[in-house]
Image: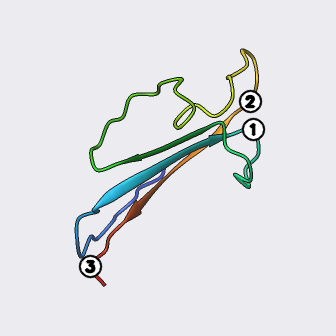
Amino acid sequence: MDADYVVTMTYPADYYLLNVDTSPTFNDPSIVVKTANNAAAITDDGDVLRKPLVNGQLYFWRVQAFSQRL
């Protein structure tokens, strides 16, 4: 399947929120990262990696962009 995406940005994002979870509802994410950059390090300090990732487990991920300019 081919898909074309066109995004028109009014303002650049102030920060991004990355979530990784075993559920597509993201009720209890394993990873939560808030970053102002387009890259982030996943660490096991408890703030980012909330629970260990399991090899072979299916994970869902999403990135949300936030702007404080409304």
User: What is the spatial separation of the Cα atoms under label 2 and label 3, in whole angstroms?
Assistant: 36 Å
Q: Which residue was labeled with disc 3?
A: 69
Q: Residue 34 has which mark?
A: none
User: Considering the image in quadrants, where does the C terminus appear?
Assistant: bottom left
Of the two numbered discs 2 and 3 in the rendering, the one whose residue sits closer to the viewer: 3
Which residue type carries mark 3?
Answer: Arg
Residue 63 locus on image (x, y percent): 48, 51
Q: Which residue was labeled with disc 2?
A: 58
Which residue type carries mark 1?
Answer: Thr
- In the picture as drawn, the residue positioned furthest to the top comes out as 55
Q: Is residue 63 left or right of residue 52?
A: left
Circles 2 and 1: CB atoms closer than 8 Å: yes
Q: Residue at x 39, y 60 (%)?
A: 65
Answer few, some or many: residues within 10 Å of disc 3's Cα (few below 14, many 20 plus, some between 14 and 19): few
Answer few, some or many: residues within 10 Å of disc 2's Cα (few below 14, many 20 plus, some between 14 and 19): few
Q: Is residue 52 left or right of residue 31?
A: right
Residue 1 locus on image (x, y percent): 56, 45
Q: Which residue was labeled with disc 1?
A: 22
Q: Which SS class for mark 2?
A: loop
